[in-house]
């Protein structure tokens, strides 16, 4: 208590200074304070301002993370975890300053248990690297948010992406986590057993907590066998509505599609130009089917029948790996493909998710809004889950343009909430969506979240100013 | 503060008396204090003693639950939720007395959203009733713990059962919960969107919390289309090891089996007698395949090839609904079928779950233990998840027999933990497994669980004496 009282008499600036000094003597060259490095570790992806930490520590092991957290706890200084910097809502910003922990050097694959279809990895492993390492063993990890994010970051934002309709999100594919707590202790959330009813589900509590409850230093992930057959398809539609209704009917009929992605006509046009495709410039679904050869054929046939009922098709299939890669690369490059549509502007990705019965309505109303407001905002979506993004081009230096963009985003979220949806399907809350937490959840739910935050991080040092900032 | 101080000067007995008086005037005939009713609402399924509450309140709506919790909070009296009384670890016992809330009258199905494949129900709906109501709409809810449990109870224990290998557990199939908190407020954990990254995953926190963090008064559940084709099969094996190895190879090869259940030879003998089957009395797998007709055939063929490699088969198929029902009824009646093996004894179900690579080892070592100790304990298991039960026959009135049973159960859990497994795959902690929480999780993890309990239930009134009793 004496220490805490003494600390709180110092200014935050003085405490940060003391923490950095202490970390320098403990971790030496792993501590970097140059502005360029600090800025590169804060938000660089959206309209949110870049708010750098006071120092970046390049952690190499769990003990390093413990050292940083213990030091920050002692000096009551914020600590912000960083994986690959691909987050979209300012999760890595340091609005109060403090210490950023760069986890990218903690990138070892510790175990691959082929018989159990799981692996144990450090948080800095990226999803592409993991899948490269797994390929020879006939295994893969399906969660694919597009960017080559770190698995620690993906767990922390409860990421999902194109395969979620079949394989679930990070919440469904993390078996266990090793976490450094706010006091610098290490805990493990669960065993490697596939299921358990042994107490509170801490795994799912830390997944999606955005580093505000603890810092993930190890993940045990579920793996899957690479399917015997994979077939991708591109299916054009006369309207976004027809495409959405086809998606709904496909899901309802139980076809186990692995991917079912919508691109509206503006996005197809951008992707044609960027990725040198020659798709018809009309609303289009990109699909992928996984299974045995027979099952993949059957799935594709059934999907084709449904699409035809809504005036869609015919599908063009890509079976060869290099054709499939080109297709999905084009889908993943949607963000980049949009940039030339308004040179100098920034691309801001929205992320609502609604019950699938409301998907067509939500997309259509949003398209009308885009047209009425004169915005450039192509639509892509993981529509099998009811989740879609608009890639809004914003001149962040023009206050009027930024205000219009914010107005559009607010209307979009309100529309999704009114339809029983959520303000974020997969990007997370970070700083950008805190204002929607109360409208989405209500005060009683927020109170419970705040109580949990307070219980696990009473000094509020873990990534403060995010989710339910207290 | 004045009220709290005054309350704590009264004995628990006096406070309970005051709470019951208050509830009688608020809820009248819904409050029952007869011993028979109170005993029937405490543990009646295992060797754990029956510890009745002081009163049972038959709640009919969320407001009733709020009234009970508010009254119990005011008087600092325990409140224990009750669904169908089928839990196996003393979850419904009232070791400190208090008020039991019977939720069985809250059994309305509030919404079935066929387009979204979800439904909203009250917690007292049982799984059989739900599926009866859904059948006409071509939908089903897959989680099937055997007993006709209430969905609120199934969520609270994170139940799973025979279909979990394909469809997951309750944690994977609850979209949202309405919960009455320790202060009697109502919160909703999430929207009906299929996925969300909007803050802490309160849904997964309340699933498996056994009523210690809040009382579930409404559930939004995922539904599935009834598969076009369903085929069940029975496949005999020369040994438990051969059966386990077949399961491992089946899962690894990606065959999407819907059910894959092991019965050892002692269980087959008991089921033959009880359910009038004429199965070969050898270790046996019960399976079910879901899909299109072609896919079901393909799955069954591939499974047959794998089984043959391990000396198993040939499989006998049950395609007609009534044949399949007979088979699964026999599986579900495993508990009852064992009772005649030792008349007068009680059946106690164990519940370890291990990484699937260790399944054969764990089952074989356990069988040796059963033989060496001279116990009667047939084995059944959801072996696709690495989860198996032994149904141990215990004369609970014979201290020596009970001590031997406890010694066996302790050895079993220690074996599972040493193999990287969990003390409970699906039954939960309740009272019976609290002693294994520290060995399984370690103190840092338990501290985090205790902090959460303290944060959400500071007066410790919600089902006290369970999970991490503080």
Image: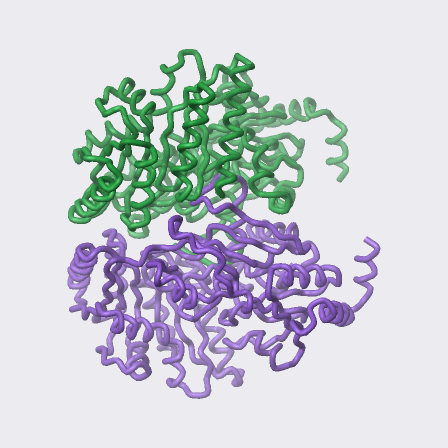
Chain colours: A purple, B green
Left or right for A458, reference A228: right
Image quarter of residue A323: bottom left
Q: Quadrant of residue A259?
A: bottom left
* Residue B151 visible, this orientation: yes
Residue A16 drawn at (x, y percent): 73, 70
- Looking at the picture, does residue B32 appear above or below residue A82? above
Above/below status of A447 relative to A50: above
The residue lying at 58 percent from left, 27 percent from top is B99
Q: Nearer the viewer, residue B111 or B136?
A: B136
Name of the residue lying farthest toward the bottom: A343
The answer to which quarter of the image holds residue A165 is bottom left
The structure residue drawn at horizontal position 51% and vertical position 33%, both measured from the top left corner, is B413
Q: Is residue A468 visible?
A: no
Where in the figure is residue B378, as x and y percent of width and height?
A: 38, 24
- Left or right of B305 on screen, residue A350: right
Q: Nearer the viewer, residue B60 or B204?
A: B204
Residue A428 vs B417, above or below: the answer is below
- A149 to the left or right of B297: right
The residue positioned 51% from the left and 65% from the top of the image is A107
> In this view of the protein, which residue sits in the foreground, A71 or B222?
A71
């Amino acid at each position: 208590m004496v220490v805490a009282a003494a600390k709180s008499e110092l200014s935050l600036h003085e405490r940060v200074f003391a923490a950095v000094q202490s970390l320098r003597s403990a971790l030496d060259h792993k501590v970097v304070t140059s502005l360029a490095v600090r800025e590169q570790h804060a938000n660089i992806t959206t309209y949110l301002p870049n708010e750098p930490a006071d120092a970046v520590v390049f952690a190499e092991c769990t003990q390093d993370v413990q050292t940083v957290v213990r030091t920050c706890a002692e000096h009551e200084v914020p600590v912000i975890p960083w994986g690959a910097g691909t987050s979209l809502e300012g999760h890595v910003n340091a609005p109060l300053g403090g210490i950023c922990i760069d986890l990218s050097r903690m990138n070892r694959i510790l175990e691959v248990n082929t018989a159990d279809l799981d692996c144990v990895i450090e948080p800095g492993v990226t999803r592409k690297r993991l899948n490269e390492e797994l390929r020879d063993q006939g295994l893969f990890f399906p969660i694919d948010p597009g960017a080559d994010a770190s698995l620690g970051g993906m767990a922390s934002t409860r990421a999902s992406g194109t395969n979620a309709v079949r394989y679930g999100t990070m919440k469904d594919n993390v078996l266990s986590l090793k976490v450094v707590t706010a006091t610098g202790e290490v805990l493990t959330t669960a065993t490697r057993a596939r299921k358990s009813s042994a107490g509170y589900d801490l795994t799912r509590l830390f997944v999606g907590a955005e580093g505000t409850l603890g810092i993930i230093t190890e993940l045990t992930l579920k793996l899957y066998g690479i399917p015997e057959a994979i077939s991708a398809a591109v299916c054009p539609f006369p309207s976004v509505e027809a495409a959405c209704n086809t998606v709904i009917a496909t899901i309802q009929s139980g076809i186990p599609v692995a991917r079912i992605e919508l691109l509206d006509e503006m996005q197809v046009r951008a992707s044609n130009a960027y990725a040198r495709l020659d798709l018809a410039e009309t609303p289009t679904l990109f699909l992928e089917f996984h299974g045995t050869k027979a099952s993949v054929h059957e799935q594709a046939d059934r999907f084709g029948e449904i699409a035809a009922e809504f005036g869609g098709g015919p599908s063009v299939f890509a079976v060869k790996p290099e054709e499939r890669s080109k297709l999905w690369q084009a889908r993943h490059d949607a963000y980049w493909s949009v940039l030339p549509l308004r040179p100098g502007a920034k691309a801001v990705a929205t992320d609502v998710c609604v019950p699938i019965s409301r998907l067509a309505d939500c997309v259509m109303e949003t398209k009308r809004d885009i047209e009425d407001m004169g915005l450039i905002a192509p639509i892509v979506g993981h529509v099998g889950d009811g989740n879609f993004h608009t890639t809004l081009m914003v001149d962040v230096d023009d206050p009027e343009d930024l205000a219009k963009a914010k107005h559009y985003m607010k209307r979009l979220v309100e529309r999704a909430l009114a339809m029983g949806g959520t303000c974020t399907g997969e990007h997370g809350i970070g700083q950008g969506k805190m204002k929607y937490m109360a409208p989405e959840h209500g005060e009683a739910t927020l109170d419970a979240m705040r109580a949990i935050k307070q219980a696990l991080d009473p000094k509020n040092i873990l990534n403060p100013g995010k989710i339910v900032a207290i």
